[in-house]
Amino acid sequence: MQVCLASTSPARLMLLRQAGIEPITRAPETDEDALTAQAASERGTDLAPDDLVLLLARAKAADVAHRLAADDPSFDGIVIGGDSMFALDGRVYGKPYTAEEATRRWREMRGATGILHSGHSVFRLQPGLPRREATAVAEAAVTFADDISDEEIAAYVASGEPLHVAGAFTVDSLGGAFITRVDGDPSTVVGMSLSTIRAMVRDLGVSWPDLWS
C-alpha cells in the first residue's frame, strides 16, 4: 500500500517513519491565507479553530491527491494532509514567523494551558475508482511550565525553532522541556494524531499494518 504525505513538514514525516511508514512527500500548492479569508467572508465571521484546520487539511490533501492521480494513474494508496493551530484564551495562533511575535506568545503561554487543534484529511486513491475521503479533527491540551525565565524564552526564540511551527512550540525537540503536561494523543502536538489517522484509514477499508514499510 502506497502512502503520500501532502506536506513537507519534517515533524510529520518523522512521525510516519517512527510508525513504520515510509511515505513519498509532495508539497501542496494551496494559498492558506486566501482560503482562510474566503471562508471567513462567506460565513461572515472567522472560522473556529476546528473548522479552520479541517478546511486547510482538506485543501492540502485534495490538491496533492488531484495532481498525484494525474501524474501517476497507477497510484494505489492513500494521501494524508494535515494542518494545526494553537488556541490560547480564545485566540488562535498559527506560525509566529518573527522573533518578536514568538517572544510575545511565550510570555503569554508561560504557566498557561492551551489547545492544539489538528485537522486531518485522508484520500483513498485506486486506479479506475472514484476518490474517497475521510476527515477528522484531534485536540490535545498543552500546559507550559510556570517558571520559564525570560532568558530561557530568549534562548529558545534565538534557536529559530519556534518561528515556523504552529503555536511557536514543539514537544518533540527543544521546546519539550518547557511543557509539563499533554492531555490527548501526544502525536497531535507533533503535527498529526496517528491514532486518528489509523481510524480514518480503517474507515476507508485500509488496515494500518498494510501501511508499514
Image (tube, helix red, strand yellow):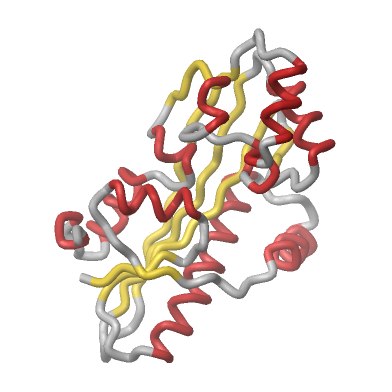
Q: Please indicate whether residue 135 sits to the left or right of residue 204 in the image.
A: right
The quarter holding residue 208 reads bottom left
Picture quarter with the C terminus: bottom left
Please tell me which residue is depicted at 78% across the width and 30% down the height of the picture: 103
Between 24 and 63, the one lying in front of the other is 24
Please tell me which residue is depicted at 65% across the width and 34% down the height of the picture: 87
Q: Please indicate whether residue 40 sits to the left or right of residue 86 in the image.
A: right
Between 166 and 100, the one lying in front of the other is 100
Task: Give above or below for 147 relative to 154.
Answer: above
The quarter holding residue 124 reads bottom left
Picture quarter with the N terminus: bottom left
Task: Give above or below for 195 relative to 204.
Answer: above
Please tell me which residue is depicted at 44% across the width and 52% down the height of the picture: 12
Q: Position of residue 176 (x, y in %)?
A: 51, 27
Task: Give above or below for 100 relative to 73.
Answer: above
The quarter holding residue 88 reads top right
Task: Give above or below for 180 relative to 204.
Answer: above
Q: Please indicate whether residue 150 sits to the left or right of residue 148 in the image.
A: right
Q: Please indicate whether residue 41 sits to the left or right of residue 182 in the image.
A: right
Please tell me which residue is depicted at 43% across the width and 51% down the height of the picture: 136
